[in-house]
Amino acid sequence: MSGRETKTFVVTRFDPDRDEAPRTQEYEVPVRGDWKVLDALNYIKDEVDPTLSHRWSCRMAVCGSCGMQVNGEPKLTCKTALREYGERVEVGPLANFPVVRDLVIEMDGFMERLSAVKPWILEAKGAAEVEGPHRQTPDELAAFKQYSMCINCMLCYAACPVVANEPDFLGPAALALGHRYNQDSRDHGASERHEVFRGEGGVFSCSYANECSEVCPKNVDPSKAIQQAKLLNVLDWAKGFVVPRGGK
Amino acid sequence: MVEVLRHDVVIVGGGGAGLRAAIAAVEADPKASVALVSKVYPMRSHTVSAEGGAAAVARADDSLEMHGYDTVKGSDFLGDQDHIQYFVEQAPKELTLLEHWGCPWSRNDDGSVATRAFGGMTTKRTWYAADKVGFHMLHSLFQHSLRFDRIVRYDEYFVTKLLVLDGRVHGVAALDVREGVVRAILGRAVILATGGAGKAFPFTTNGNIKTGDGMALAYREGVALKDMEFVQYHPTGLPGTGILITEAARGEGGTLKNADGERFLVTRDYGVGKKAELGPRDMISRAIMLEIQAGRGVEGPYGEHVLLDLRHLGEEKIDTRIPFVRELAKTYAFVDPVYEPIPIRPVLHYMMGGVDTDIDGATTLPGLYAAGETACGSINGANRLGSNSLTECLVFGARSGAHAVRYASGAGAPDEARARAQAEEEAARLDGIRGAGRGDEPIVRVRQEMNRSMEAGCGVYREQGSMARTCKELAGLQARAERLKLTDTSKVFNTEIVAALELWNLLDVAEAIANAAASRKESRGAHACSDYPARNDAEYLYHTLVLRGPDGRPRLGKKPVTLGIWEPEERKY
């Protein structure tokens, strides 16, 4: 594992103060056999070119900072082993996002989408405050647990063909998160979220390409969440004709 | 001219403590406006990496008294007992609140919250969400915080200075990393919640952002850092990367073995008694180091290690209770714990010390508060028990948020003109640093030498000679760090200037750690001094304070420990 082999990293550079368009820069890096893509970027930053900008922190695939395109595919760079790649490795900023600089993308749009789906427990109107923890069985927990595992790394946005074409699309991570709360036995806000879901850029914009679930490093399966949400949304919409709103 | 932004309370740091403080502040005062300033997006905060759980009494066979005693004993009697009493009382309320806010706690079959065993805890009182407790806590808090319009976020703003006028804090100067400009964020109270400083060391579980920023900000304004000599080595990190393998792996039944396959915590006397693998972290880390020194370690590409064996738990239990352990071991150690033991060794994990606060989170500088790992509210004393720190973030985050907003409502308005002038000076200072091209010391070299020196002087075992050497080396590195070589002249997302600012913060914190350590000529908790192997209550039952002297060098002081409930006794398990 300690032997070093040299790989060439073709890294996208862009400084809005200097560059009109992104360019690439090549770096030779002596890599260890157990390195991830992120280790090579940190080597470049420390030892070769301190002007390279990239985000990272936990280096254990849970903070969600270091998503990038690696050979054209969205990857969490701290989790992506270099030994799976050949002599040349291309690293660029996540697709489908505006670029701030080099490998750093603009996140404002994503943060707004997260808030839009009301990702918090909505209590029933007029409900008494619960003393102590709610009861929630392991089965009730399992109904949403998978959808609560999203680390907001945004690889799914980089992979999604709808995000690429429809600027208003709330996107896989945000919709899956909204669905996560709808599936939580402690939550009573499904109807409110269904209104968001059926609006512009909601669940029905999803074309079920499934790319999001394929690139998700945490097996959240946003595609499944969105398909479930579509069905529940139709039921909620139909229910609106039978029971007046607020009569849940 | 520097832009001025106005709020009532300014919180620096968006992890567990900062978010909890923000929510508490807006709930305590229906008109208050809170700035949540973080150098990253809040969900990137290092709370996210905590794995095993959060402690609070939940079972019929448990009591607040037992949680209190375990914590005091774990602290090697250096915790403040009145603070600990408050902490254990509030703990169940805070974890319940988090449950109401959506945290997906693991459950028993009847739907009640499940608890697991943890090191140094008498019974099962650690609440968990599989083995991603910090992740779920952080995201639950962050998502809940989005409900409140009055929590105004400043994401990717690096706070470089506290604005202090007439002996009280008026806000902060912060570098907007994306734009590369300094702004003045004014508030009548400021809460520091920036986490610890693990990156002062070479081998740590901590993420890249754990650079002691809040500790350094307070220290430079004359606030004392307390008990800095006590740094926690977690027994089970992956060799090479330092990635954390949670104590829950042992809580669920994992065992530690040496090269001979011997369960050394059972077969040899390391002071942990029947607790074996569930002894406190300081003792188990020392036991591993002694096993390795005795030649019973396993040789690996990153030096010697011992083994964490989970095979007897079986695939199903591993996948239900500690799935992240399996993912981490496979991804980063290329080992599947269902079939092979995991190589592990002690790794720098947590700062027991921090900004000296009272029970409200208040510091000696009026208007300045601290909470979470940044603070030292003396819950943890000389050694923290695993799963107390996430709870601490909530309990004291909430209390400091409520108290800060109360202080702010009674304090006079900030002096805007003078505060802005301070921020202007700060902007000019940063302009002078950015891409200056004058220095000759690469950031990476100074950082690596600091890391090496900290490990040599402030490791699991310490001795007077090496600690003194580290103090001297750090002073030399401070001088070299004045000549850092910066080459990136761009304003937009300049991570080089951020790395320089972080290194300066780390050096101040590292000096505080090393000087405090050198002054304590006894062994207590995580401070294991080879020259003075016994605890010495007669001379050293006090908190160490480190203050920045007029020459910039650390000065030492003392503060009494609050006892009164549990008398100090020999710490044996």
Image: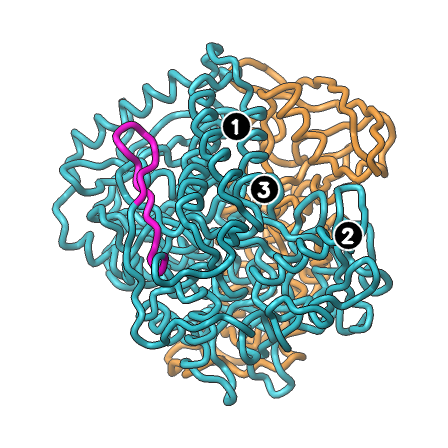
Chain colours: A orange, B cyan
Tell me if mark 3 has few (under 14), some (14-19) or many (20+) residues whose alpha carbon lies within 10 angstroms of its own.
many
Mark in the foreground, 2 or 1: 2
Q: CA distance from mark 1 to mark 3?
A: 13 Å
The answer as to whether the residues below labels 1 and 3 share one chain is no
SS type, badge 3: loop
The three-letter amino acid code for the residue at tag 2 is: Gly
The correct choice, above or below, for B363 with respect to B106 in the image is above
Residue B571 point in image, percent of width and height: 49, 70
Residue B35 appears in the figure: no
SS type, badge 2: loop
The three-letter amino acid code for the residue at tag 1 is: Thr
Tell me if mark 1 has few (under 14), some (14-19) or many (20+) residues whose alpha carbon lies within 10 angstroms of its own.
many
- Chain designation of label 2: B
B271 and B364: which one is in front?
Answer: B271
Q: Magenta segment, which residues? A: B540-556
Q: Which mark is residue A57?
A: 3
Residue drawn where x is 63% and y is 30% of the image = A103
The three-letter amino acid code for the residue at tag 3 is: Ser
Q: Is residue B551 magenta?
A: yes
Q: Which mark is residue A96?
A: none
Task: Tell whether A104 sits left or right of A61.
Answer: left
Residue B391 point in image, percent of width and height: 46, 66
Q: Which mark is residue B295?
A: 2
Q: Is the Cβ of the residue at disc 2 closer than 8 Å to that at disc 1?
A: no
Residue tagged 1: B495
Q: CA distance from mark 2 to mark 3?
A: 35 Å
Task: Tell whether B140 sits left or right of A86.
Answer: left
Q: CA distance from mark 2 to mark 1?
A: 43 Å
Q: Quadrant of the N terminus of chain A?
A: top right
Residue B327 point in image, percent of width and height: 75, 56
B68 and A52: which one is in front?
Answer: B68
